[in-house]
Amino acid sequence: MAQDKLLKELAERLSLQGSGNNIHGDYGGYWFTLYIDQSNMLNLITSVDFDGKGRESDLKDHLESIRKPYRLTYRLDGGHAMSMVLPRSMSVKATVEKAMEVLESVTSEFKALGLANSCYNCGANGRYHSYSIGGISTEICGSCVTGIEEEYRNEKETLMVSGNYFTGAIGAIIGALLGSVVWLVISYFGFIAALAGFAMAYMSYFGYKILKGKVGPGMPVIIAISVIIAIIFANVVEVAMSLVYSDFGLTFVDALVIAPRALFDNEMFYVVEVWKNIGLGLLFGVMGSYRVIRNSMDEAKFKRYEIERTKL
């Protein structure tokens, strides 16, 4: 997987290691993991013992003080786990500078509060080996590694025999069609955007999971086909809307019955133009849905359940 440009720059500037959408290493004497999530946001995670003696309250106060200036969101869990999410700026350089300033700010606060790193899973104080769990590297203790491996093995065995492609496909198609509403809204204002492709893919994935689709190699294929169907459907609805606004006096239901003929009836419609629009829509759909489909492919290969020691 090609490394995200932002993470590549951060890895070079901060001397961190990693590949793809995940880098890990030390900054200011503390370990951090930085990765890009499905929303293309920069995530920064670590684990420090802030439990007790009002340290969590003090840490929250500090995070609140930098929340608005950097537009970040944060979460503290279990007295040790800490995550921050930073939206990207207009340029890689600006985002890198912002991320470095945030890291400098929080590590200074860690030192002021006397916080030390801990296991990301259980919070046991100390520094441990880094393990990649589902593609995200964190430092966890040996006993947690053993426990997670056993838990993942059991979950994977369960998933391999559960779920149903048929019900998942129904959910995926329904979800993609609901996501096509975003397409129609954007198209109404004369635009086509990758955001619409993302919305359809995300809703398709969500629908697939809601109706308990099987986790397997067929999942990303079903989601991709559902997005294609939704794009064609959205274009047919656009044709129907244009018929309603014409002088033919058609109701929307009547127009919706006639509109599918725009895909093949050259006597009634400019079929070539319709398919050109569909082709353009598929291009933007691929751009917008790529990350969701890519992640579903990883899920189908059970990469979320992979745990291996990181080589730093």
Image (cartoon, grey):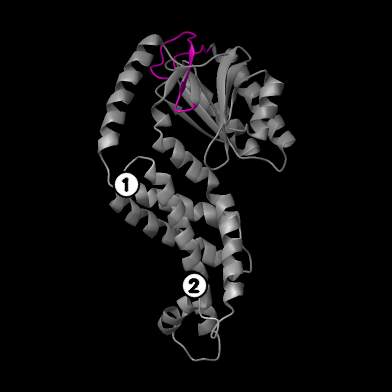
Residue 213's tag is 1
User: What kind of residue is marked 2?
Assistant: Val
Along the viewing direction, whichever of 259 and 114 lies nearer the viewer: 259
Q: Is residue 111 left or right of residue 181?
A: right
Residue 178 image point, x, y percent: 42, 61
- Asked whether the beta carbons under mark 1 and mark 2 sit within 8 Å of each other, the answer is no
Along the viewing direction, whichever of 2 and 59 lies nearer the viewer: 2
Q: Is residue 233 left or right of residue 164?
A: right
Distance between the alpha carbons at the discs numbered 1 and 2: 28 Å
Residue 110 image point, x, y percent: 57, 16
Residue found 39% across the figure and 23% down from its top: 78
Residue 236's tag is 2
Residue 278 image point, x, y percent: 56, 65
Quarter of the image holding residue 96?
A: top right
Q: Is residue 286 above or below residue 129?
A: below
Residue found 70% across the figure and 22% down from its top: 12
